[in-house]
């Protein structure tokens, strides 16, 4: 299972196809330039574009591409693809239309055209390998992760070149394919090739650690990244989410409270997670009343600041927090604020349970009746509580009717039927 919601920066890089070389006639003497692939064994082919007229058309077509005029670009470049005698001209035209289609959001057509341009095989080395690298990026953008990896491997094998960005690209592909050890190795290789690793690489690395069972490494790294950027809300989210996954509630509370102090705590989900972290810490060996009090302080602060929006779920959480701390008055207050916002009877049921514990059986019966009318998840349990409330109110017929309803629910059938048998026997 991939926990992608934890990693706010884990997304494909923005892509923009470029023209690695302008079309040139074979008779033009190329200016000497430093190659980006000095170690390749590929022999650069000779250019076969000899028509000045066709070169002019190509330039006009590429100008249309750069100007975003798709119709004009297709009008000028498609005939060259279809009928030019120059393989180089065809390849350049295909590259141009690949760019046009990519910019129009048609990634699959862009991939098809760019691949054809590369496969013609007449591009100069820098252009040829540059387009191959772009093809790998497009495959990733189209979620063809294995094709992206295969293309990257070909680029590396033929071009004899290694870059940090290429290993980071591979790391993202491996992550998407659930190959986490390979993703970790690729990102670590990328980071070894530069002194300026990108934040997105660390997101992939943390995600891969977390998915491969190395949660402690992911948490350590996430916290370190956050401490470098303590006012970054995205970093705060990542660090706290991983710590919560690791059940390091104290660690999650520490970074979330730091974010609350310095203004980095902005996301509603992170506010809610801080409330939950205090409760989880209290329920796992901590002091229940202290944990409840701290959770409610955060909740009330979040509501006051507009960070936590009123909802049935949020008031249910606050009510549960108050109930854990044995503060019935506050629990009822939160539950009753949330009940009108709910689409079911769960909060009404929670109110009834508080009243039942206080031995206010009439109030418990009132709210249980509302809860059952609106619908609850554990209907049998609600009917059993209703039956007991009616029994305490000396309303035996109503108690029996409620227990019969509980007997229809598989979850409570056995207990309810046993109760009914004892009632029939006069016990």
Image (tube, helix red, strand yellow):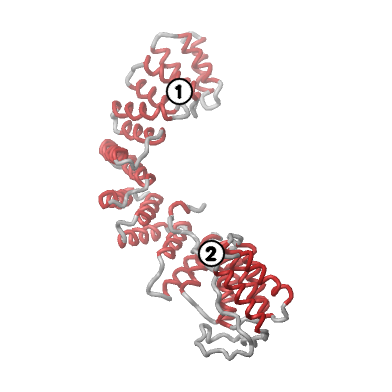
SS under mark 1:
helix
Number of marks in picture: 2
Name which of mark 1 and mark 2 comes first in the sequence: 2
Q: Which quadrant holds residue 61?
A: bottom right
Residue 349 lies, in percent from the top left, at 42, 25
Neighbour tally class for label 2: few under 14, some 14-19, many 20 plus, Cα within 10 Å = many
Residue 322 lies, in percent from the top left, at 31, 32
- The residue that appears at 36% across and 52% down in the rendered structure is 240
- Asked if labels 2 and 1 touch by Cβ distance under 8 angstroms, the answer is no
Residue 190 lies, in percent from the top left, at 45, 72
Instruction: Give the labeled residue for mark 2.
Output: 174
Label at residue 371:
1
- The residue that appears at 28% across and 48% down in the rendered structure is 260
Residue 15 visible to an observer of this rendering: yes
SS under mark 2:
helix
Q: Which quadrant holds residue 387?
A: top left
Residue 28 lies, in percent from the top left, at 60, 89
**Eyeballing the image, is 367 above or below 263?**
above
Left/right of residue 403 with respect to residue 239 in the rendered view:
right
Q: Which quadrant holds residue 332?
A: top left
Residue 141 or 41: which is nearer the viewer? 141
């Amino acid at each position: 299972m991939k926990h992608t919601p934890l990693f706010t920066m884990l997304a494909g890089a923005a892509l923009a196809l470029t023209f690695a070389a302008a079309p040139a006639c074979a008779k033009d003497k190329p200016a000497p330039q430093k190659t980006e692939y000095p170690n390749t064994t590929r022999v650069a082919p000779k250019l076969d574009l000899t028509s000045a007229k066709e070169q002019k058309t190509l330039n006009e077509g590429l100008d249309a591409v750069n100007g975003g005029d798709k119709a004009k670009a297709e009008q000028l470049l498609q005939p060259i693809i279809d009928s030019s005698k120059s393989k180089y001209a065809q390849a350049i035209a295909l590259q141009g239309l690949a760019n046009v289609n990519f910019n129009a959001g048609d990634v699959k057509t862009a991939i098809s055209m760019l691949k054809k341009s590369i496969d013609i095989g007449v591009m100069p080395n820098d252009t040829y390998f540059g387009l191959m690298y772009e093809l790998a990026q497009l495959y990733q953008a189209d979620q063809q992760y294995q094709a992206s990896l295969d293309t990257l491997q070909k680029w590396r094998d033929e071009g004899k070149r290694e870059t940090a960005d290429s290993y980071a690209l591979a790391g993202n592909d491996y992550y998407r394919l659930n190959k986490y050890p390979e993703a970790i190795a690729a990102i670590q290789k990328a980071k070894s090739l530069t002194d300026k690793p990108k934040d997105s690489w660390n997101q992939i690395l943390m995600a891969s650690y977390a998915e491969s069972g190395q949660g402690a490494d992911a948490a350590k790294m996430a916290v370190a990244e956050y401490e470098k950027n303590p006012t970054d809300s995205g970093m705060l989210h990542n660090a706290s989410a991983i710590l919560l996954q690791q059940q390091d509630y104290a660690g999650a509370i520490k970074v979330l409270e730091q974010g609350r102090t310095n203004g980095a705590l902005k996301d509603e989900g992170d506010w809610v997670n801080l409330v939950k972290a205090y409760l989880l810490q209290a329920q796992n060996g901590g002091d229940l009343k202290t944990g409840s009090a701290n959770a409610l302080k955060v909740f009330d602060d979040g509501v006051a600041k507009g960070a936590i929006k009123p909802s049935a779920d949020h008031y249910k959480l606050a009510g549960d927090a108050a109930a854990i701390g044995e503060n019935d008055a506050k629990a009822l207050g939160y539950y009753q604020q949330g009940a009108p916002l709910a689409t079911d009877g769960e909060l009404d049921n929670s109110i009834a349970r508080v009243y039942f514990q206080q031995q206010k059986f009439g109030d418990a019966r009132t709210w249980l009746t509302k809860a059952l009318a609106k619908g609850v998840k554990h209907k049998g349990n609600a009917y059993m509580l209703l039956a007991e409330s009616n029994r305490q109110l000396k309303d035996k017929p109503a108690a029996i009717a409620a227990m019969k309803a509980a007997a229809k629910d598989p979850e409570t059938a056995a207990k309810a039927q046993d109760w009914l048998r004892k009632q029939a026997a006069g016990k």
